[in-house]
Image: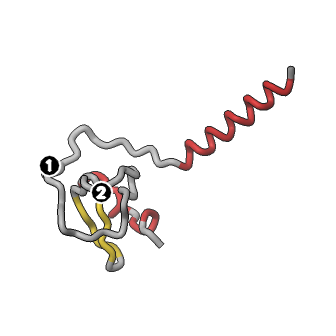
Amino acid sequence: MKIPIVLAALLSIALLSCAKETPQVKHKTNMNTSGKNIENITVVNTEDPICHMKTAGFLKDTAVYQNKTYGFCSVYCKEEFKKNPEQYAQK
């Protein structure tokens, strides 16, 4: 009887620890984008470093950090990146 309870507790702990590692970015309802996708720009990332949305085909904004161009799904994510770029930049 104690084994299912212990297993449930361990599973809960594991799920909660994984959930804390994933950034919980919520976009604003108005993300201030031009509505047009940016084309013909090479970026170093395939997903938005803030919200982890795939940016292939949906690139809305870019920022340059340490001579690397990063792509973002919105101005909101770009502004979050600019607040602490070393946290999100690729090594």
Q: Amino acid at mark 2?
A: Ala
Label 2: element kind: loop
Count of numbered marks: 2
Nearer to me, 83 or 36: 36
Q: Disc 1, disc 2: CB below 8 Å?
A: no
Q: Residue at x 30, y 57 (%)?
A: 56
Percent position of residue 57, x then y: 25, 55
Residue that numbered label 1 is attached to: 35
Q: Is residue 47 left or right of residue 19?
A: left
Residue that numbered label 2 is attached to: 56
- Quarter of image, res 75: bottom left
Above or below, 81 relative to 21:
below
- Quarter of image, res 7: top right
Percent position of residue 38, x then y: 18, 60
Percent position of residue 5, x then y: 79, 25
Label 1: element kind: loop
Percent position of residue 52, x then y: 40, 52
State the CA–CA distance, disc 1 to disc 2.
15 Å
Q: Residue at x 32, y 66 (%)?
A: 70
Mark 1 or mark 2: whose residue is earlier in sequence: 1
- Quarter of image, res 67: bottom left
